[in-house]
Amino acid sequence: MNVQQHERIAQIKTLSGYLCGALTWIGYLLWVFGPLMAIALLADTSGKSRYTFLLGDVTVKDIDLSYPQRFLVVLAMAVLFFFVIKLTSNLRDLIRFFSKGEIFNKDAIQHARRALLNGIVVFGFYLSTLVAGWVYSILTSSTVNVSLNIGVIFGLLFFGLMYVLLWSLEIGADLNEESELTI
């Protein structure tokens, strides 16, 4: 094996180990801050609190929410946090395989596929907030501003690259299995 290639693989393993640790801490923070946000929203009994929501490019300020409305917001937050936590967990497990040097196997591909699907769901939440913001701005103002959000383009590019990564992992796993059968 080429010495330069071996050093690069060792660097990838080291960097993947650091990234795995960072994703672990991000997962812990999501598990802590998700319920804290829900508790803060539901436990407010002062009656003076007014909430601000960011819907894509539109900011909705000073909204007074009843308890059923707060519960619906918490439910939507819980669903979003569920998919973000699953995304983080699957990415962490995928990166853990990379840190062990086991890149081209079926388990790594499963984690990549699950992370990609959870990421698409989270991106769908993002797109739905953009649409809700556009609808809100149309209903509440006399002028309609039509703008292209650059985040949508970056999201589509990101998921295109993720599919290329997934396909290359699948091809690498198939080639790895074939080489093992040949030996």
Image: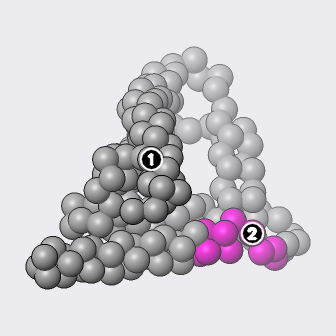
Residue 36 in sight:
yes
Type of residue at label 1? Ala
Residues at discs 2 and 1 in contact (Cβ within 8 Å): no
- Whether 74 is among the magenta residues is no
- Image x and y of residue 72, in percent: 43, 47
- For the residue pair 107 and 182, the one nearer the viewer reads as 182
| Tag shown at residue 82 | none
Sequence order check, earlier mark of 2 and 1:
1
The quarter of the picture where the C terminus appears is bottom left
- State the residue position of label 1: 10
- For the residue pair 19 and 81, the one nearer the viewer reads as 19
Magenta residues, as a range?
146-157
- State the residue position of label 2: 150
Q: Is residue 65 left or right of residue 42?
A: right
Residue 69 in sight:
no
Q: Is residue 177 left or right of residue 78?
A: left
Q: Residue at x 65, y 46 (%)?
A: 53
Find the residue positioned furthest to the top: 46
- Whether 148 is among the magenta residues is yes
